[in-house]
């Protein structure tokens, strides 16, 4: 099968060292989603609930999420926003706590 424009796009992303793509599939990117499936998970496609979340996760992927993935399991991550905690849990396999949870732990010496 001949390479499509989307296949060339993914090839360029890999050349640039991009190995994760966040997005929300819709009619406008169906060709890219198809190329992602053919690419064998490089780059990995991480589907978000909506476009704004995909943009937020892509920004976090530059510094925050890799740091969470490499951190000690004993590290405490504090994030007050529900969507922030959800994104950290989904993308970094790391549990973030709300400030109230951390204060409760400190008060009860957990």
Image (cartoon, grey):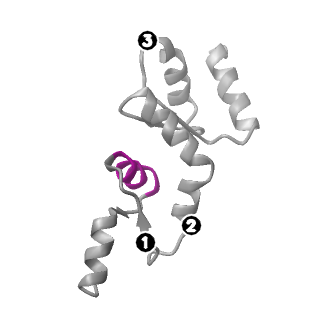
> Under tag 2, what secondary structure?
helix
Q: Is residue 110 above or below residue 36?
A: below
- CB-based contact (under 8 Å), mark 3 and mark 2: no
Q: Earlier in the sequence, mark 3 or mark 2?
A: 3
Q: Magenta region's main secondary structure?
A: helix
Relative to the observer, which residue lies in front, 13 or 59? 59
| Residue tagged 2 | 70
Q: Position of residue 83 (x, y in %)?
A: 35, 45
Which residue: 36% across, 56% down? 80
Circle 3: is it few (<14), some (14-19), or many (20+) Cα within 10 Å?
Answer: few
Count how many numbered circles sit on residues in the image.
Answer: 3
Tell me if residue 85 comes above or below residue 76 in the rendering: above
Whether label 3 touches label 1, CB < 8 Å: no
From the top left corner, tell me how far across and down residue 48 is, in percent: 40, 35
Mark 3 vs mark 2, CA separation in Å = 36 Å
Indicate the secondary structure of the residue bearing disc 1.
Answer: loop
Which residue corresponds to mark 1?
Answer: 76
Find disc 3 in the rendering and name its residue. 27
Answer whether residue 96 is magenta in the image.
Answer: no
Q: CA distance from mark 3 to mark 1?
A: 40 Å
Q: Position of residue 25 (x, y in %)?
A: 42, 23
Between 89 and 1, the residue placed more toward the observer is 89
Residue 14: quarter of image: top right
Magenta residues span 83-92
The image shows residue 15 at horizontal and vertical percentages of: 76, 36
Query: Which quadrant of the figure has residue 97?
Result: bottom left
């Amino acid at each position: 099968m001949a390479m499509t424009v989307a296949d060339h796009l993914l090839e360029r992303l890999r050349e640039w060292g991009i190995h994760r793509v966040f997005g929300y599939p819709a009619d406008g990117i169906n060709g890219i989603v198809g190329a992602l499936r053919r690419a064998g998970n490089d780059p990995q496609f991480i589907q978000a609930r909506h476009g704004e979340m995909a943009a937020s996760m892509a920004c976090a992927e530059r510094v925050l999420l890799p740091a969470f993935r490499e951190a000690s399991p004993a590290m405490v991550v504090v994030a007050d926003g529900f969507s922030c905690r959800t994104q950290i849990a989904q993308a970094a396999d790391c549990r973030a706590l709300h400030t109230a949870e951390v204060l409760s732990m400190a008060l009860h010496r957990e």
